[in-house]
Image (cartoon, grey):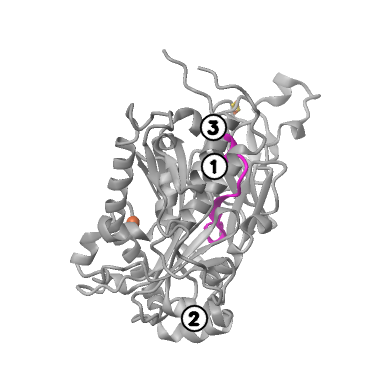
Amino acid sequence: MEKHSRITKETLLSLKEKLKDGVLPQWVLADRDMYDLEIKQVFGKTWQFLAHESELKEPGSYVTRWIANDPILLTKTKSGEIKAFLNSCTHRGTLLCTADSGKQKSFTCPFHGWTYNNEGDLVGIAVGNKVYGEEMNKEDWNLRPVPNVDSYQGMIFGNLDHNAESLSDYLGNMKWYLDMMLGRSDGGMEVQGSPQRYVVEANWKVTAENFESDPYHVQFTHKSSKELGIAPNDPFFPGHGHQVVLDNGHGINLVQFDDTGVSPIPYQGMPESMWPMFQKNLNVAQNDMVKDTFFVGGVYPNLGFLQFSLPLLNSEMGLYNFLNFRVWRPLAPDKVEVWSWHLIDKDAPQEYKEKSYVTFLGTFGPSGLLEQDDAEIWSRVTQASNGIMAQDKDLSYNSFLNYLMGMDRVQPNEDFPGPGVAYPLCFLDTLSRSMHKRWIDLLLAETPVKEEVR
Ligand code: FES
Ligand code: FE
């Protein structure tokens, strides 16, 4: 069997040059060696979203998650601290906790029965005294903690890199926008239900980019939503607004419904009784954004978000606002597991929360109207990227993806009141280019220089 090519520093530098010209070769969407390097350099080095604190309500609560191939067990201890461990028994490595979530004081391994408390301490060894003698020190065999765990606005992240920068530095100026999305209500946000999960045959870069930086696709991919009357019929929707390029590959699109800049559904359809609370908790610029735009963007590399209400004309389903966070967990070069959370303000009326959840399910749940449109297109990119022509690595042939939209043509809005570099429209590839620049920089970090081997 032919050996795969290796990804060298030269390869990556040539990608960087191409990106400056606004193009990337298609082979990067389906190459196994590229994928393996990404797992190490991107997912092994960046802060990864694990859970929202509302999912771990009481001491003893736990959830199980993944950072790419690393199973993670998150617990809330007796003192209320949140801890994260590799969900793998230290005896012989078995997946320790197989449930999605629950509440319990200890975890007993199904293989030979070792037991850990929710602080990660090994507290019980089946017939330990008889089989190991008294000299075995249990403390040497505690669960392995995730090297870095921290949270911002209730969002808990983990980082597998021992030398990682702080979460605060990593998020950088994205924090201002997270404050806007998550901090508008006194009680913050809370997760409704469990995260939805499903597998899509697509490369993680395709799904991440589609959410964070590609409002342009709505025109065609979601054409039926216009025909159904649940999205404005304006051919430029959702191009109006600002695309904001933020630190470290993060970004947000602040989408206006039309070119007036005034939303027909103020405060994203939240109950009027809550508007004064938003005004109190947000600064003027944030308040104006929540009042007149909706948000779609991402925390690089693989946390997408969406906060909006569709102006549904035919039923009342879409009049309800929701915040959707989603992680694109890579499973293979052509496969992602989507983890998708529904969040709504803790202070919202109960009936509103329930309708918000149903609105989320009907639009961006696994069988949601818009989700189905997207998932079909994502997998078609994969279908068309695996063949000999698309995988040709000789860059003298034309097999490039086009990131030229707005390049050298659209200038930033210097008067934009929020942080970041803001461009005055959302049909733009500027944020995609920023994401892919960050991707190459991560891949290049500490990459050994070596000759290409075939
Ligand atoms: Fe867990 Fe043996 S692998 S007790
Ligand atoms: Fe979409």
Quadrant (top left/top right/bottom left/bottom right) for the N terminus: top left
Residue 55 highlighted magenta (yes or no): yes
- Work out whether residue 51 or residue 283 is closer to the camera in this orientation and state it: 283
Q: Which residue is mark 2?
A: 288
The mark lying in front, picked from 2 and 3, is: 3
Q: Who's the residue at 37% across and 60% down the image? A: 215
Q: Element under label 3?
A: helix
Looking at the picture, does residue 237 appear above or below residue 393? Answer: below
The type of residue carrying mark 2 is Asp
- Gap between marks 2 and 3, in whole Å? 44 Å
* Label number found at residue 16: 1
* Distance (Cα) linking label 2 and label 1: 37 Å
Which quarter holds ligand 2? bottom left
Give the distance between the C-alpha atoms of the residues marked 1 and 3, in whole angstroms: 9 Å
Residue drawn at the location 65% of the way across and 42% of the way down:
146
Q: What residue is drawn where x is 61% and y is 38%?
A: 444
Residue 253: mark in rendering? none
Which quadrant of the structure image shows residue 89? Answer: top right
Q: Is residue 250 above or below residue 319?
A: above
| Mark before the other along the chain sequence, 2 or 3 | 3
413 or 375, which is in the foreground?
413
Q: Give amino acid for label 3.
A: Thr
Q: In the rendered view, tell whether residue 133 sits above or below residue 57.
A: above
Instruction: Rate crowding at label 2 as few (under 14), some (14 to 19) or many (20 or more) other CA atoms within 10 Å.
Output: some
What stretch of residues is rendered in magenta? 40-56
Foreground mark, 2 or 1, reads 1
Query: Which numbered dot is residue 11?
Result: 3
Category of crowding for the residue at label 3, using alpha-carbon neighbours closer than 10 angstroms: few (below 14), some (14–19), many (at least 20): few
Q: Is 43 on the left-hand or right-hand side of 343?
A: right
Q: Which residue is outermost to the top?
A: 1
